């Protein structure tokens, strides 16, 4: 059983601890919410040490989990106080969150060991926000980092794939190995990381991790790991169960966001084991039409002893064509030799933009008995098409690629920090924007235009959340020509408007710069905003709206617009206000009860939002207390309640857009959301004070 406790008196804490020990509780997570701390490391040490004493007096061994989100660097002081400590903020069920936590937690290996563990948070495996490849990376890297394995999904409804990932005994054995060592970083560059974890029986667990967005070959010389010199090494893939051997280099072709984990040991006669033969591939963006794109494949023999009769073939989607412009066969490949082949891949006209798998397979024979072997990799191709005619918010156009100094490029919010969706409304010189692209300099975003677009307008500037003194620059490139530039821009200044002529351009690139040494000597980066960017393609009618079209549900320009409270007995008030507004001059000030309440209104006749897919509203939390926000609707003659259950948190004195797709609203069995027949719209808020505006449907 597991309880979370908050700050309380020593007497009540001791009493509660004694009761829990009597019930058989064996795990205490001491959270940091509402802590009233002065923020100093000394205060964190005092508070968490005081709580440490309570389970010590019960006579029962209780695991003590310190959860202060890494704010006081507990890895530096918590050994001997807690058994584990959170190193980061809360994990999210998305790839950027997972990637950022791995990047932060992996270098902390010197601080972990038996009885004192780095805790990168509980696992999201099976909750639906990531792919199975990403969830296997989640499980793999938590095991390599000797992290606590706390399941965060409902096992009653878990899929067979989820149970297979969570139940991988060989991966669990790496995590739970008695030696208790966190894997060390052998290499970490260009999004590729290698971890080496010693195991109690003398084996090594070697993880080859690919954080990039494309298939990549990840390699490490055995001599750079803790493996002793040998004639060769046996590699057991802990996800596929396959066993191969490598002479000097441990290598694998790892899919985007994927991880290969080998259990490695020296082998006396490597020639008796199948060789490791990674198949790599690289492919640029593909455009439908006769020009085609270039695919490069590699077949490398990492085994001890040559392989013979090497041949490689490529399988593309139906209707596509592929032809080799280099050798596809080799009589033999010696150890560490590579067969490299260039191919032309052609995509038929009319192919929709998207991601398509291409399979690369190598065949060969190995050993004295000429046994047959195959190695296969899948490379994901990206097909791009030009935007349709019209004026549209650039954030709604799929970018082909991007680089960003910190975290992902954010749509319709500032860049925040390294996690996804951790920013606020874009704000330049005090002006709020609900549409735009948030980046951290240096950054670059590319879009395929195909010669069909004519112009781009955007307001640019350094976001108010980044109070640096380093000037930023914004440049718009049409192909390789700069067609608009901001010059130096400082934080706190008014936005600058850029207008770019894109006539005939195949590619659009948005580039920002703005980084340098801060007052303490560390590198600081400007948060660079492309606010309200509108792309024009074809010859649109000037009277047509900018796409995607939004329909206002509540503007609050004339008053509270019949906003009411769903549970009046629980408290809460609303008032017309000018303190926060994203459209017009007015919004709504809401004083919810601390636990929260639902605010909105019912409709008779029903509200018709036919043709829309998403509800949104803009929010600013109060100055001292944050708020949790949620969206619900009622449908049908019985006013059936349908709710999103996203419970989006906004920090004190911060802003964001809360959004919920109709298709993600959960309804009771037998009910669905028809946007054309909404009987009520409700917004949940808690805390002490919040401001909202511009409730709308897109």
Image: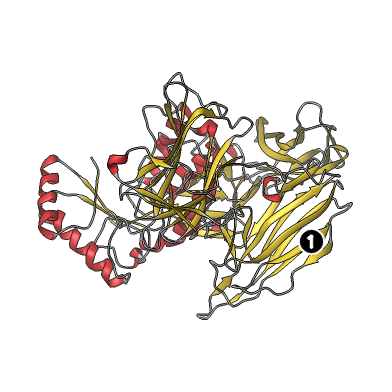
The quarter of the picture where the C terminus appears is top right
Alpha-carbon neighbours of circle 1 within 10 Å: few (<14), some, or many (≥20)? some
Give coordinates of residue 407: x percent, y percent: 56, 57
Mark 1 element type: strand
The quarter of the picture where the N terminus appears is top left
> Residue at the spot x=59%, y=34% of the render?
613
Count of number-bearing discs: 1
Question: Extreme top residue here?
Answer: 670
Q: Establish if 183 lies above or below 349.
A: below
The foreground one among 341 and 380 is: 380
- Which residue is labeled 1 in the image? 499
The foreground one among 79 and 582 is: 582
| 673 displayed left or right of 290 | left
Asked whether the viewer can see residue 401, the reply is: yes
> Residue at the spot x=15%, y=41% of the render?
24
Question: Extreme front residue here?
Answer: 558
Give coordinates of residue 312: x percent, y percent: 76, 35
């Amino acid at each position: 059983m597991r309880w979370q406790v908050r700050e309380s008196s020593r007497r009540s804490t001791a009493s509660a601890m004694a009761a829990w020990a009597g019930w058989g509780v064996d795990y205490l997570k001491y959270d940091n919410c509402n802590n009233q701390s002065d923020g100093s490391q000394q205060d964190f040490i005092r508070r968490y040490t005081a709580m440490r004493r309570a389970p010590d007096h019960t006579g029962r061994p209780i695991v003590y989990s310190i959860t202060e989100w890494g704010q006081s660097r507990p890895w530096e002081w918590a050994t001997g106080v807690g058994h584990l400590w959170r190193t980061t903020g809360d994990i999210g069920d998305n790839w950027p969150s997972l990637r950022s936590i791995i990047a932060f937690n992996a270098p902390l290996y010197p601080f972990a060991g038996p009885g004192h563990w780095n805790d990168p948070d509980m696992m999201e495996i099976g909750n639906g926000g990531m792919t199975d490849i990403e969830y296997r990376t989640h499980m793999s890297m938590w095991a390599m980092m000797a992290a606590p394995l706390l399941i965060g999904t409902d096992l009653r409804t878990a899929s067979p794939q989820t149970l297979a990932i969570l139940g991988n005994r060989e991966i669990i054995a790496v995590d739970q190995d008695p030696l208790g060592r966190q894997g060390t970083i052998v290499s970490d560059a260009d999004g590729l990381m290698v971890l080496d974890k010693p195991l109690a029986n003398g084996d090594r667990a070697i993880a080859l991790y690919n954080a990039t967005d494309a298939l990549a070959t990840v390699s490490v010389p055995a001599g750079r790991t803790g493996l002793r010199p040998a004639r060769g090494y046996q590699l057991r893939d802990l996800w596929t169960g396959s066993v191969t051997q490598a002479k000097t280099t441990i290598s694998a072709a790892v899919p985007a966001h994927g991880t290969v984990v080998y259990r490695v040991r020296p082998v006396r006669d490597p020639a008796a084991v199948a060789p490791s033969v990674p198949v790599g591939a690289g492919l640029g963006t593909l455009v439908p039409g006769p020009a085609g794109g270039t695919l490069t494949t590699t077949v490398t023999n990492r085994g001890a002893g040559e392989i013979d009769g090497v041949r490689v073939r490529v399988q593309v989607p139906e209707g596509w064509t592929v032809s080799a412009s280099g050798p596809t066969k080799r009589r033999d490949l010696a150890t560490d030799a590579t067969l490299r082949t260039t191919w032309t891949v052609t995509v038929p006209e009319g192919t929709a933009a998207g991601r398509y798998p291409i399979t690369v397979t190598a065949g060969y024979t190995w050993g004295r008995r000429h046994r047959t072997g195959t190695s296969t990799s899948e490379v994901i191709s990206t097909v791009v098409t030009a935007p349709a005619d019209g004026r549209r918010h650039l954030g709604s156009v799929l970018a082909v690629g991007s680089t960003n100094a910190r975290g992902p490029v954010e749509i319709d919010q500032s860049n925040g920090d390294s996690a996804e969706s951790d920013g606020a409304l874009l704000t330049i010189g005090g002006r709020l924007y609900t549409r735009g692209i948030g980046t951290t300099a240096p950054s670059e975003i590319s879009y395929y235009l195909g010669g069909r677009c004519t112009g781009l307008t955007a307001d640019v500037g350094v976001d108010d959340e980044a109070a640096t003194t380093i000037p930023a620059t914004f440049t718009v490139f049409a192909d390789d020509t700069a067609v608009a530039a901001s010059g130096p821009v400082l934080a706190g200044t008014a936005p600058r408007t850029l207008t770019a002529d894109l006539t005939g351009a195949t590619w659009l690139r948005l580039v920002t710069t703005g980084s340098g040494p801060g007052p303490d000597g560390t590198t600081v980066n400007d948060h660079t905003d492309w606010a309200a960017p509108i792309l024009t393609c074809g010859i649109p009618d000037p009277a047509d709206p900018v796409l995607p079209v939004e329909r206002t549900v509540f503007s609050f320009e004339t008053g509270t617009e019949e906003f009411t409270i769903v549970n009046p007995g629980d408290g809460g008030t609303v008032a017309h206000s000018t303190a926060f507004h994203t459209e017009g001059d007015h919004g709504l000030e809401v004083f919810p009860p601390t636990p929260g309440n639902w605010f909105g209104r019912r409709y008779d006749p029903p509200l018709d939002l036919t043709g829309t897919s998403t509800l949104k509203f803009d929010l600013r939390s109060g100055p001292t207390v944050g708020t949790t926000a949620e969206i619900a609707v009622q449908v049908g003659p019985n006013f059936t309640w349908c709710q999103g259950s996203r419970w989006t948190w906004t920090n004190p004195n911060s802003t964001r857009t809360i959004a919920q797709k109709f298709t993600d609203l959960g309804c009771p069995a037998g009910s669905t959301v028809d946007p054309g027949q909404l009987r009520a719209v409700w917004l949940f808020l808690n805390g002490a004070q919040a401001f909202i505006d511009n409730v709308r449907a897109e």
